[in-house]
Amino acid sequence: MSDSYLSFVNSAWGRRLAQTIGLPQPLPLQRHRSGQQGLANPVIIAGAGRLADEVRRIFKATDTVPAQAATLKAPSTVKVQGAVFDASAVLDLKQLDELYEFFHANARRLGLHARVVVLGTAPEHCQDLPQAIAQRALEGLVRSLAKELRRAITVQLIYVAPGAEQALESSLRFFLSRRSAYVSGQVVRLEQPVDAAPAINWDKPFSGRRALVTGASRGIGLAIAQVLARDGAHVVCVDVPQALPSLEQAASRVGGHAWALDITAADAVQQLQAYVAEHGAFDVVVHNAGITRDKTIAKMTETAWRSVLAVNLEAPLHLSQALLQGQGLNAGGRVVCVSSISGIAGNLGQSNYATSKAGVIGLVQGLAPVAAARQVTVNGVAPGFIETQMTAKIPLMIREAGRRMNSLSQGGQPIDVAETIAWLAHPASGGVNGQVVRVCGQSLLGA
Ligand SMILES: NC(=O)c1ccc[n+]([C@@H]2O[C@H](COP(=O)([O-])OP(=O)(O)OC[C@H]3O[C@@H](n4cnc5c(N)ncnc54)[C@H](O)[C@@H]3O)[C@@H](O)[C@H]2O)c1
């Protein structure tokens, strides 16, 4: 669905009009395209924690221009495409001043679409109270910078547990690239990986891996199948039997396999087990299929309540449990669930949907430790307003509000959710487990 306001304020006279009367002027986001340089370049690397060496190694291992040293006192006017501040060794409130000095001096050096990452030590891993408070304070800084830097710049905080430094690379590569264009103001925790990461082919990380994506015939599910296939996976595309023609089309577009399965069917678990017995285990499972049946609760039928919970929550739970209990997921496997910011903030007319999507967050958090024992991770994404057939059904004024109520002042695209899922499903992302990451342009809802 096209965003006419975004196109208008980026046209020659629309831009002039917007400037004259002070309308918001969102920039069209730049997204990753195959063959493009992955990492932002050049970047400033600053801070002196235990992660700085790893960050420099990651940059050296790529073809990027060497990172520039931080120029705290003498800011240069040269624009940069990114900044990484290693704040993992900030021990007390006084040392927070170093972040003020850095961002005060360098904020204007950040070019359009720049990527900013602050690295920290999660409060639960800190040695004492002053350090835990200072580290927690980083969240406020990061979320504020994500709101005020504008110009399509994104800002994230990655807490890296002591000993998990080697787990940083896949996350840093994601957040410092155009793949994360619609993710901002997020806080991610990295722990010791649940598995031993194999040697990674960063261009085709899913080579030789089998993925299952539900709801893959259109919208976000189709984009997930495309991104996983682009990055080397063989994708089994699942959708309801009624969607078979578009499902087969989707599967052939990604060179995968179409499987017509209603995930709420009474024998769906048995069908999955039989499929695994015949074709082998999966490396990646993405529970994307979802439905809405919106009504305020007094007007909502029992069928509308039950069907939404069945598709969005019960099916992913039963299928995940069956895969984990049987031999349905290989070691190093990844389960990714699709929640929603409705599940975080609640939404008028969506008590069924929000219940199901909040339940998905519970599923992720509850299954993650169980899965870790099998060297599998379980994570989730919570999309905000994404331009799909689902959101095209929303009445115009509400749709327009949904698009603008975030720091990037626009809706996301299915590929934004897909790229985030590909990061969580990445073979090198074994240190990310039990997390739910919002793909919402830092939506004001539930913030
Ligand atoms: N579009 C958004 O703004 C948005 C925001 C937050 C979350 N989400 C979530 O993202 C996911 C994808 O959303 P979308 O916008 O692409 O929706 P969509 O309606 O375009 O696609 C959903 C797909 O799921 C399939 N599906 C539904 N019931 C199924 C079942 N029982 N078995 C198998 N497949 C089934 C549908 O046939 C469809 O192909 C959903 O879980 C949705 O709740 C979307």
Image (cartoon, helix red, strand yellow):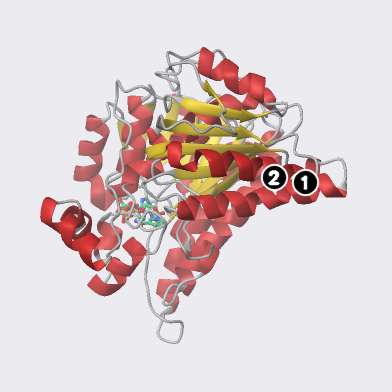
Looking at the picture, tell me which residue is in the foreground, 182 or 251: 182
Q: Can residue 5 be seen in this view?
A: yes
Q: Mark 1 points at which residue?
A: 94
Q: Residue 113, image x and y in percent?
A: 37, 40
- Quarter of the C terminus within the rendering: bottom right
Left or right of 67: which side holds 301?
left
Q: Which residue lies furthest to the left in this view?
A: 13
Q: Residue furthest bottom?
A: 298
Q: Quadrant of ligand 1?
A: bottom left
What's the mark number on residue 97? Answer: 2
What's the mark number on residue 146? Answer: none
At label 2, which amino acid type do we have? Answer: Asp
Q: Residue furthest right?
A: 128
Q: Residue 215, image x and y in percent?
A: 35, 47
Q: Residue 28, image x and y in percent?
A: 27, 46
Q: Residue 346, image x and y in percent?
A: 51, 70
Left or right of 201: which side holds 291?
left
At label 1, which amino acid type do we have? Answer: Lys
